[in-house]
Amino acid sequence: MDGDFRTAFHHDAGGLRQYPALVLNADYRPLSYYPLSLWPWQEAIKAAYLERVDIVAEYDEYVHSPSVEIRIPSVVVLKDYVKPRRRVAFTRFNLFLRDEFSCQYCGVRSDLTFDHVVPKSRGGRTSWENVVAACSRCNLKKGARSLRQAGMTLRKPPRRPGAEELRNMGRKFPPNHLHETWMDFLYWDAELEA
């Protein structure tokens, strides 16, 4: 009996990792779309117990303690509004998101790196206005030359994105797993087709 209990416990514990909770701000919008704001089920239950969130939707699965049975939250909403950042951090991830995870020279969506439009060796700065997502092939082709010298053009000029613009861009790239209880909260403000 002891062996069966341990096996079942380990099986359930691993399976429980598959139950993240979508975290919504007090206005019922996700804190972020890409990456999607998710908490492990343990954090969601803890936040609910501490009365920091309300549980809006639940999975059909339960966790048990010796005296309590709790349904696993699938969507939680913060009780206090968290003001979104106005300034967008200049990170590789945000740069790729701004450029829609595609090479700004050829449009390929794989093997991405980044490129200085005006090469650093020619005084180019590492900034939103001078760095673009590029596939390795185009990056190698351009090298330390100007666009004109390399005979290349940009699909769109690089610029600093706004925070709301980047959040909206993230909605175009849903994660691999979307639980059915999340759908109303992820796309409730999307424009409907006529």
Image (spheres, grey):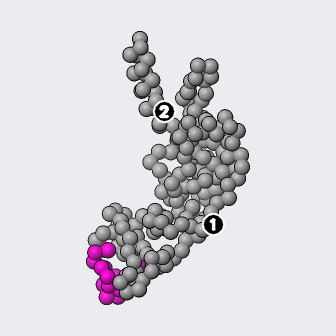
Locate the N terminus by quadrant.
Answer: top left
Judge whether residue 30 can be spotted in this image: yes
Tell me the tag on residue 9: none
- Marks 2/1: CA–CA distance: 35 Å
Measured along the vertical axis of the image, is residue 99 above or below residue 194?
below
Look at the image and say whether residue 154 sits in the magenta stretch: yes
Circle 1 crowding by C-alpha within 10 Å: few under 14, some 14–19, many from 20? few
Q: Residue furthest top?
A: 1
Identity of the residue drawn at 47% across and 37% down: 18
Measured along the vertical axis of the image, is residue 147 above or below residue 188?
below
Residue to which mark 2 is pinned: 16
Judged left or right of residue 158, residue 108 is: left
Judge whether residue 74 can be spotted in this image: no
Residue to which mark 1 is pinned: 86
Identity of the residue drawn at 47% across and 45% down: 177
Instruction: Where is residue 158? Give x, y as percent.
Output: 47, 77
Q: Which residues are magenta?
A: 138-155
Locate the C terminus by quadrant.
Answer: bottom right
**Three-letter amino acid code at the position of disc 2:** Leu
Look at the image and say whether residue 160 sits in the magenta stretch: no
**Three-letter amino acid code at the position of disc 1:** Arg
Q: Earlier in the sequence, mark 2 or mark 1?
A: 2
Identity of the residue drawn at 53% across and 63% down: 169
Identity of the residue drawn at 61% across and 41% down: 75
